[in-house]
Image: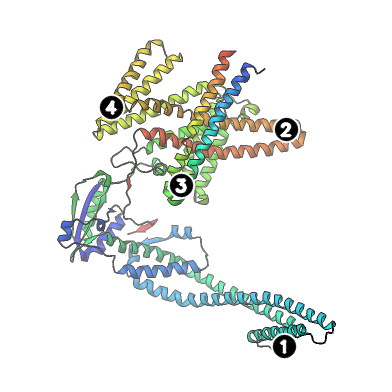
Amino acid sequence: MVSQAGWIAIGSGLAIGLSAIATAIAEAAIGSAAVASFTEKEELFGKALILTVIPETILIIGFVVSILQIFMLAGGGE
Amino acid sequence: MVKVQIIGLNKDRERVVKKLHELGVLHVEDLTKRVPSELLEKGLEVGKPDEKAGEISELLVKVKGFLANLPKVYDEGDIEKRIEIKKSDFENLIPTTSSFLQQVENEVTPLLKRLEELNEEQKRLEEFETNLKKKMKELLSLARKIERRKRLRKRKDEKLKELVSHLRQELQSLLSVIEEKFEERDFDIKKLSKKVKKKLRSLKNEKKKILKELESLARKYSKKLHKIRILLEIEYQRALIVSKFGVTKRLFLVEGWIPAKFYETTVDELKKVAEIEVIKLDIKNKEDVPVMLDNPQPIKEYETTLKLIGLPKYGDFDPTIFLFFTFPIFYGMMLGDWGYGLIILMAGLYFWKKNVWGLGRLSKLIILPAIWSIIFGFLFGEFFGNLGMELFHWKPLWEDRIESITHLLVFTSLIGVAHLSTGLLIGFIQCLKHRENKHAMEKLGVLGILIGGTIYVLIMMGQLPQSLQFVGLGLLGVGIVVTIVATKGLGFLEIFGIGGNVLSYTRLLAIGVASAGTALATNEMAKTFSSMLGTPGILVAIVVGVGFHFINLLLGILSPTIHGLRLHYVEFFGKFFEGGGKEYRPFKMEIKKYKS
């Protein structure tokens, strides 16, 4: 049987892992479009770079959720 | 910015243009794109480039041609830095340049031509040599075929006859080629290839000699050629700018922008060289005004990072100062390792001073963030991850990032609240300035939601006393109402937006923990290797440790930079920055040393 700590670990792993996959999918699409646009017009580099990292927020929120799960649930569960 | 019209007599035009170029403050508007119809009626025409322009560009092409074809004996960047331009250099520039270029041409062109001939000859000979070898092989195999055929002793062998005649033909043609090339009727392959080799050798020797002569010529002329190139480019710009003017038979008119602080002196200086009339125009449309960022050093350096996403509109707040203060702090907080910080600081200083790979200006920007990384490194007690703690028991001055992660999560969110509030306040003031009252109200409402919400959450977490609950909920409620009223309902989305913005600041912790985690894993790996494998294990540990720390360091330069900038561009600037400003580009000489 999986212990309670185990469930929490799986949960927080999923939280950060799935959001990382989501970020990756979003960034792949934006990134390729960004590269295409700034090869045409070089001064777009800054904007392209920023647009590319925008979905990283999904990952950050996943990270926060995962941390909260580990520290708060584990802290409360024991 | 002051919008001006300068009107003068055509006979003074050259002097005025020269003075304007030297002063380098007038952003010239292209009048030809919109000559007002009333002026057209009065006989104003679109200016044509100075008649000298053609001559200058011809000379310029020649100079550039010589510079490209002469061997490079000096470092070009170095030469350019040392060239000193004097006002007197422009006197009689075209005639003196023409005669000088004639002289250079007389000396250089024959050599270049000869060099080209030699190169071609060499190519031909080399080709001949390889073709000859190939041909000989073919002929030999043909001869062998004939031999075999003969041994069959057939009576009427048509095939044999055919082969023999083919061989004869081939030999004939080969001999005629050789005769033509080497004036020789004997066919001795060894002699021939010796001859080719000898010819090639003498060719190469001549080439060497010519190159040496060219090098000495380059030493003699290239400095002057570079100087002439710069002078001609300046003259060319001056000749071309006229095409943005409006002209009549006797007068010329130029329109443009001058920063207000330079206005008086510019007019005075111009009036010294010619009789001109300067008219101050009203600014009708703010969108047209070019934007000049005006920050003192060293803040000015960070203007580059602002220009990455565009300039603020004319009269709007210039956020460069935040990129100078908060961006380095954010960077330092994310990297937060004084081992890495020291390396980046040293590398940055080195790249800056030596201008390695032309990254001098860019590396200057990393110095301040590196210093903050060192400061936060001490606060978090990180020296190459936990290496300092493991080896020397260095304790953090403030908190261990990995152990007190929840605590720091709150802390970084609060930094976000502070940063966003500042942005909203700037936005509020800016809206008031533009008399956009609705927008100003919205900013204030969102600020209420932000502060009220934060207070409420902190009370829930037990960080603030319960008695403040009224304040928090009140602010939150008023904020929501004001926002919704100001935006006619759509504003309720802002409630979620601002929450997301605050959470976004937790990346200050997340990026750092990821980097610290990688460093920790690296150290653990190295430790395992060294304890498992004995003496060779220590070597493996060093290789693994250095390698992984190096990769982590590279990521530690890239990642915090991008995320630090992003927090400013997306979350912070989103509260007040509109962008889309037109850059102020004065008509100016781009040279290092100028003596008038």
Residue B218 versus residue B451: which sits nearer the camera?
Answer: B451
> On the image, which quarter does residue B235 sit in?
bottom left
Say whether disc 4 or disc 1 marks the residue closer to the N-terminus.
1
- Three-letter code, disc 1: Asp
For residue B93, say whether it is visible: no
Q: Secondary structure at mark 3?
A: helix
Q: Circle 3 sits on which residue?
A: B361
Quadrant holding the C terminus of chain B = bottom left
Compute the Cα span from label 1 to label 3: 69 Å
Q: Is residue B140 above or below residue B8?
A: below
Say whether disc 2 or disc 4 marks the residue closer to the N-terminus.
4
Q: Circle 1 sits on which residue?
A: B186
Q: Residues within 10 Å of mark 4 (few under 14, many from 20)?
A: many
Q: Nearer the viewer, mark 1 or mark 3?
A: 1
Q: Is residue B357 left or right of residue B424?
A: right
- Three-letter code, disc 3: Arg
Q: Circle 4 sits on which residue?
A: B486
> Disc 2 is attached to a residue of which chain?
B
Q: Nearer the viewer, mark 2 or mark 1?
A: 1
Compute the Cα span from label 2 to label 4: 65 Å
Compute the Cα span from label 4 to label 1: 103 Å
Q: Circle 2 sits on which residue?
A: B530
- Three-letter code, disc 2: Ser
Say whether disc 1 or disc 3 marks the residue closer to the N-terminus.
1
